[in-house]
Amino acid sequence: MTAVAVVTGANRGIGLHTAEQLASRGFQVVVTARSAASAETTAAGIRQSGGLALPYVLNVQDSGEVADFARWLNQHLGRVDILVNNAGVFLDDGVSLLDLDDETLMITLKTNLLGPIYLCRALVPMMLARNYGRVVNLSSGYGALNDMGPYIAAYRISKAGLNALTAELAAELVGTGVKVNSVCPGWVRTDMGGPQASRDPVEAAADVVWAATLDDDGPSGAFLRYRADIPW
Ligand SMILES: NC(=O)c1ccc[n+]([C@@H]2O[C@H](COP(=O)([O-])OP(=O)(O)OC[C@H]3O[C@@H](n4cnc5c(N)ncnc54)[C@H](OP(=O)(O)O)[C@@H]3O)[C@@H](O)[C@H]2O)c1
């Protein structure tokens, strides 16, 4: 039975390259995206390159959709080996906490923090059922508590919360075959990172894939960049 990898926000950026690279390693990749057309386009591209990919429409902000997704996975594939919580938004660059509007705050927290919580809650039980799993949460140096700075309040708080999810869940999963880590991909040339960013998205995705395929002696509950620990 082919191992299954789920990638959220897999239609572009780091998520797209992560999905492609996992497929090239032989995983059955579930390409989730908010739009049906982009999920199908991405999955079709992977299949044309000889990989295994299924599209699934998922807005990570919706806990009901995530619960339905877990049921669909159980019914159609029967296992989940890898979950990459990649979907994210960066909406408040340069905005002070004191000026943050409700909509920006809620979209940021729902996408970057609540979505990954919903996905872990729904899919980790399937991993535990087989005593194997790798969860990768796409975090950011902006979420490091030791390096907080001004004017990106919602994004920083969402990624700090995501790191807390990593630490909490990893602590709960000690002694099991399921590992959970946060990965900061660096500053990456995507729609989010912009054209001036220093890092190629293919390289960033390779680091995500590395964390998603750790050996049994690999870390869990770590905050990683360039495959090494960084301060929380
Ligand atoms: N790029 C960087 O320099 C950088 C640095 C540090 C961390 N990161 C993190 O890395 C991850 C990927 O970033 P990226 O640079 O690849 O960003 P990106 O190019 O902007 O892509 C973001 C992805 O998230 C999806 N998404 C947004 N809201 C969603 C929702 N509610 N439900 C499902 N999918 C949703 C987008 O889908 P649509 O196409 O539908 O919008 C898109 O597929 C993010 O978590 C980001 O915070 C990036």
Image: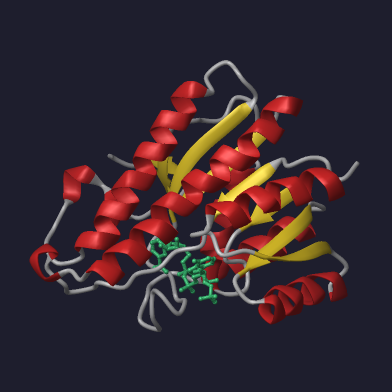
- Percent position of residue 54, x then y: 80, 63
Q: Quadrant of residue 133?
A: top right
- Does residue 36 appear to the left or right of 85 in the view shown? right
Q: Residue furthest front?
A: 64
- Percent position of residue 109, x then y: 35, 57
Residue at the spot 16% in from the left edge and 72% down from the top edge? 95
- Does residue 194 appear to the left or right of 115 in the view shown? left
Q: Quadrant of residue 91?
A: bottom left
Residue at the spot 16% in from the left edge and 52% down from the top edge? 148
Considering only vertical position in the picture, is 45 above or below 25? below
**Which is nearer the eye, 124 or 144?**
124
**Which is nearer the eye, 180 or 225?**
180
- Percent position of residue 136, x then y: 53, 46
Considering only vertical position in the picture, is 153 above or below 139? below
Q: Quadrant of the N terminus?
A: top right
* Residue 108 visible in the picture: yes
Q: Quadrant of residue 140?
A: bottom left
**Which is nearer the eye, 223 or 117?**
117
